[in-house]
Image (cartoon, grey):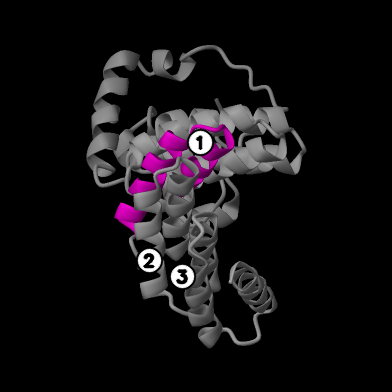
Amino acid sequence: FCLAVSRAVVEEIGVLDLRFGKGNYEDDDYSLRASQAGFKLAIARDVFIHHHGNSSFKANNINYLKSLEENRQIFLDKWKDLQRPEQLLIDILLEEADWRLHLNETDAAESVLYRAFELSPGNKTIAEKLEKLLAAQEKFAEMFALLQKYVVANPTDHEAFNALGMMHWQNSAITDAIVAFQKAVAIAPNVVDYQKNLADACLSAERFDEGIHLLLQLIKSCPSDPESYEKLASLYVEAGHLQSAYDLLDQARQYNPQHTQLNEWLNSVQEAMNATE
């Protein structure tokens, strides 16, 4: 391995740290210093360096293994406050994935992102990048498996639980969808879309008491949103409670007087009521 350094780097951060003596970890140390100063590290994959192993160490009567261990300790002491090596590797992998995508090497990018995900399955950035890549390839089964692993590692991500609920629903696993939506609502109770999804899932599963309770809560918290009124009115119509449906839709119209669908439905319910008289 050979380290090539431009003069600009030396002028910016100085020379090698002499505490590392005649070798071992001096290049690692210098690379970290350069990286922290804002310089970009790169590996020249099209270059081959030939040398005779440890010749300089042998010529200077240096015990290579002893030097390696001593300098390793110097390196660790110097950089003890550095972020975990895993995070450094994750950063490198994310950068490589972006580069692979730039080269349209989709399979390679996916492989790199999976490596990063294995290191940190609760990392939202990694999960989102990988999910986006899988979605672009219509690998929905892989997306589903990814999301299931991610929420276990990051159980406070309400967006992920809502997305998982939608995927369960698409797979006709309504009970599992309800559980996922419930978790999303528990984490972020003020997000209306999560409450709507949970209400819809409960109604789809014929858990009407829960669904109606959620719709009533939505009407109370978002009185100007016609969607919850319409869903509850639909239930009233199905049950033959036309007057209750009309009253509910009329209440919604007070907040949305120009809502075309709402007005059409009100007229339809009124006609049905007149027909039964």
Q: Nearer the viewer, residue 143 or 27?
A: 143
Tell me the CA gap for discs 3 and 1.
Answer: 33 Å
Q: Residue under circle 3?
A: 244
Image location of residue 39, percent across then percent down:
54, 53
Query: Which residue type does callout 3 highlight?
Result: Ser
* Residue matched to label 1: 168
- Percent position of residue 205, x then y: 46, 40
Q: Which of the pair 48/11 is nearer the observer?
A: 48
Residue 49 located left or right of residue 181: right
The answer for how far apart the CA atoms under marks 1 and 2 are is 25 Å
Query: What amino acid is found at the position of numbered circle 1 in the picture?
Result: His
Q: Earlier in the sequence, mark 3 or mark 2?
A: 2
Q: Residue furthest front?
A: 277
Q: Which residue is mark 2?
A: 216
Q: In x, y percent, where is residue 83?
A: 32, 45
Kind of element beneath mark 2: helix
Mark in the foreground, 3 or 2: 3
Lower sequence index among marks 3 and 1: 1
Label 3 secondary element: helix
Amino acid found under the numbered disc labelled 2: Leu
State whether residue 160 appears in this view.
Answer: no
Q: Tell me what residue is drawn at x 66 percent, y 73 percent.
A: 271
Residue at 41% from the left image edge and 42% from the top image edge: 178
Alpha-carbon neighbours of circle 2 within 10 Å: few (<14), some, or many (≥20)?
A: some
Count of residue discs: 3
Is 178 magenta? The answer is: yes
Residue for point 37% across, 66% down: 216
